[in-house]
Structure formats: structure tokens, C-alpha cells
Image (cartoon, grey):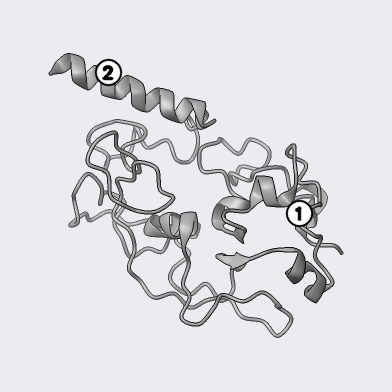
Amino acid sequence: MKTLNLLAAFCFAVFFSTMGFGQIAGSAHDFTTESWNSSGEMCNACHTPHNSLTIADAPLWDHQVSVATFTLYTSPTMNGTFGVGAQPSGSSKLCLSCHDGTVALDNFGGVTTGTNFITGVGNVGIDLSNDHPVSFTYDAALATADGGLFNPTTANSGLGSTVTADLLYAGKVECSSCHDVHRGGSATGKLLVKSNAASALCLTCHDK
């Protein structure tokens, strides 16, 4: 049994390292020294090699997912749409499962009665009306309708390919379009996918 556990742990580590997720150590999402993480493990607050939750686009997910109803961003100048009754989805829903402040940080591994909740600026709450919109489709049609956005299918992301290829998830803008939770965010300290010096990250999509 011990051999099987070690093999599972090895496979788990290889899976994430090959996915480019090897830089979480020392980042804001390195939970090895947090008092609420009694296991002292780095990844298990979000992921598990066994008995993971069945959630789309969430590899080996281990953390309780938020069921809150969110107030979405709205603006008369926004041409993107969320759809009737839409709520944050994909990776954004996973991020909000800690960052909305309604689910305890220690609600993982089957625990649903945790008592440690995110505080400070990391707690974005359930009112997202003053935050950058997420979970909306960003495509060539939106760029044309808006007039102030680059066509994501051809615009260079600065990360090796197009905005669509590098920053969108199923064609949508999500939290992870701007933030890489598995990296140290050395450029800005905010886990950004690239530096926002001179608004460079903003101007990857916004044609201003």
C-alpha cells in the first residue's frame, strides 16, 4: 500500500509539472506553512490524486466549490454578455471558492465545516459589480462590436501566441486570463500572467 501511495504521489507531481505548474512553491498559493493546512502539503488544498470532485475543467479538484449567487459586472459601455441567469464559471468559479469569502479555506479533502476564511484584499466577496468581468465570451464579433478591443484570434498575447490561445478559456475571459495561480508573480506580486508595467497586460486586449 505504501508503494502505491508513493506511486500516486509521483504521478500527481509529474502531471502538474508537465502542465507547467511547477512554480507554486514560495508563491501566494503555497499553503505548506498555513495553520489551517494541517497536512503541510502544497497542493492538496486545491487538488488531490484520489477521490477528486467531479467538476468540469478542474483537474483533480479537492476544494469545496462556492454556491453563492454573485452580482456581476455591468456597464452601459460593455458589449460582452454573460447570458440570462449566468454566473461565474470555469476556473473563475474555482478561484471564487476561496476568494468570495463564503467557503472556508480549510474546506478540502471532504471537509465542509472549516472555520478559516480569506481576509483582506483577497476577499473579493460576492459583489463583482466593481471588478473586471469574467466568464463572458471574447471573440472577433465582440471586438468588432466594441471597437475598443483587439481581435483575440489575431492579437499577439506577448506570451507566445494569440490572446485566444494563451489567455482565454473555452473562448471566455476568466480570472486565470490575467492571473496565474501557480506562479510567484515576480513581475508584480499579484500573480499576473505578465507584467502590467505601462498597462501592458490591459493593453493586450484593450485597444486604447
Q: In x, y percent, where is residue 120?
A: 45, 58
Residue 36, percent from left and from top = 26, 43
Q: Position of residue 204 (x, y in %)?
A: 78, 53
Q: Residue at x 84, y 72 (%)?
A: 147
Residue 190's place in the image compared with 100, above or below, is: above
Question: What residue lies at 55% left-to-right and 65% top-to-bottom?
Answer: 135
Residue closest to the far right: 208
**In front of the other: 33 or 191:** 191
Q: Which residue is under mark 2?
A: 7
Query: Which image quadrant: the N terminus?
Result: top left
Up-down relation of residue 123 to residue 85 (above or below): above
Which amino acid is tagged 2?
Leu
| Residue in view at x 50 percent, y 26 percent | 18
In-image side of 14 versus 130 (left or right): left
Amino acid type of the residue that numbered disc 1 sits on in the rendered structure: Thr
Residue receiving disc 1: 153
Question: Looking at the image, which is closer to me, 125 or 14?
Answer: 14
Q: Earlier in the sequence, mark 1 or mark 2?
A: 2
Marks 1 and 2, how far apart at CA: 41 Å
For the residue labelled by badge 2, is the local secondary structure a helix, a strand or a loop?
helix
Report whether residue 15 is seen: yes
Task: Give the image quarter of residue 60.
Answer: top left
* Whether residue 122 can be seen here: no
